[in-house]
Image: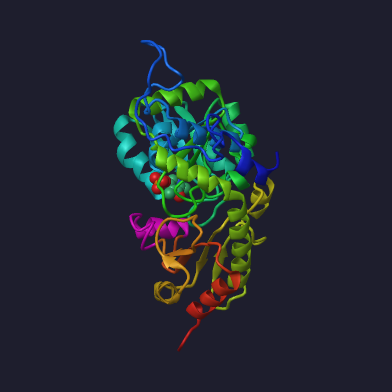
Amino acid sequence: MRKKTKMIHAGITGDNQTGAVSVPIFQVSTYKQPEAGKHTGYEYSRTGNPTRHALETTIAELENGTAGFAFASGMAAITSVMMLFEPGDHIIVTDDVYGGSYRLMTRVLERFKLNYSFVDTSDLKEVKKAAQPETKAVFIESPTNPLLKITDINAVAAFTHSKKLKLIVDNTFATPYFQNPIDLGADIVVHSATKYIGGHSDVVAGLVVVNTEALAEELHFIQNSIGSILGPQDAWLLLRGIKTLGIRMEAIESNAQHIANFLMNHPDVAKVFYPGLVQHTGHEVAEKQTRGFGGMISFDVGSEEKADQVVDRVNYFTLAESLGAVESLISIPAKMTHASIPRSRRLMLGITDGLVRLSVGIEDIDDLIEDLAQALKSYE
Ligand SMILES: *Cc1c(COP(=O)(O)O)cnc(C)c1O
């Protein structure tokens, strides 16, 4: 099955009993048992729900894994994955990892004695250098936020396999349409499905896919024990979002390529970060491991004032956090998503005051470029 067909036909897509071509929303908590202690596959909706199960089966197939799990949010998904580890374990993490993941790891999970090294995982030497006897996993994001740094997943996987470490990839930015980390050697894939998979800024959800039965059993035990599950209505919204993930990502990427080229040629833009540009440091690796470069672009306009001007003047880019939806969004990472990081560390990571981030949507490209052109114009 080819990619675009898979978005429509993978997993569980309808209802055998009625012939409904859309999976019903099973708004139910418990299930009638034929006799005490026997059940029909479902006994209680925390343990399993048919709508959630349809979504979990679908994401597992999209990521070429053994089993999928749906959670109440991306953070609930990542927290549940972290529960696979034990006090004293050490995990190597991408240094510009999503802010919420950084907060979870450093402010919540450190209480349970999980230890971390945050390193530039786009440099394999840094990953190797950070390994300790207690290291149990490497957690990477590729591309990262907001500088779209690319980690060579295959190369890191070769290292984690040789050391018997788990490789966890947050695949939110690339989506299962453009990148499949399990095919590249990852053990666990996580998604904030709030972003591209949902795709319409109307649901908060997280997904996990694992590549072995043993991990599947363990993660199901954790999901059922913690209860961090996704409800049936939201599971259904994701099933609906997945149907158009392929065409949305292609439309988004085409728009993003045009915008990246426009920004590259703009005299007031000092630097553009987009993996689809040959000038981008991770371009070659991105080209090797993904089928597309996605819809996130960051660019530096040189100063806080100019960045303020741009976000103030745009008409079709909504000033908002989050990303991955049909509508274009704009943000200033230093003041919004990355404001909690001290300025000195922000600058060290390359997140300057003049950095503007776009989540490109599926509007008409001419409107988007005209809009950015008028917003960038200087009136001295
Ligand atoms: C948004 C996001 C998360 C967190 O997901 P929520 O659904 O907001 O809990 C994790 N990782 C990345 C890369 C994200 O963009």
Identify whether 331 is placed above or below 28.
below
Instruction: Examine the rendering and report whether any part of residue 296 can be seen.
Output: yes
Instruction: Left or right? Give the position of 141 relative to 184.
Output: left
| Residue 337 within the segment the image draws in magenta | yes
**Residue 366 is drawn in which quadrant?**
bottom right
Tell me residue 142's x, y (percent): 55, 47
Taking the spot 38% from the left edge, 39% from the top edge, the residue there is 72
Identify whether 297 is placed above or below 263.
above
Instruction: Left or right? Give the position of 270 relative to 154.
Output: left
Tell me residue 39's x, y (percent): 42, 16
Instruction: Examine the rendering and report whether any part of residue 131 can be seen.
Output: no
Q: Which of 146 and 46 is in front in this view?
A: 46
| Residue 240 within the segment the image draws in magenta | no
**Residue 321 is drawn in which quadrant?**
bottom left
Q: Which of 335 and 204 is in front in this view?
A: 204
Q: Residue furthest bottom?
A: 380
Identify whether 262 is placed above or below 337.
below
**Count of numbered circles in the view:** 0
Q: Which residue lies furthest to the front in this view?
A: 18
Q: What stretch is highlighted in magenta?
A: 334-350
Tell me residue 324's x, y (percent): 50, 55
Q: Could you tell me which quadrant the N terminus lies in?
A: top right
Q: Could you tell me which quadrant the C terminus lies in?
A: bottom left
Tell me residue 41's x, y (percent): 46, 20
Instruction: Left or right? Give the position of 284 relative to 300.
Output: right
Taking the spot 51% from the left edge, 20% from the top edge, the residue there is 214
Taking the spot 52% from the left edge, 66% from the top edge, the residue there is 299
Taking the spot 53% from the left edge, 44% from the top edge, the residue there is 171
Q: Residue furthest top?
A: 36
- Render colour scheme: rainbow
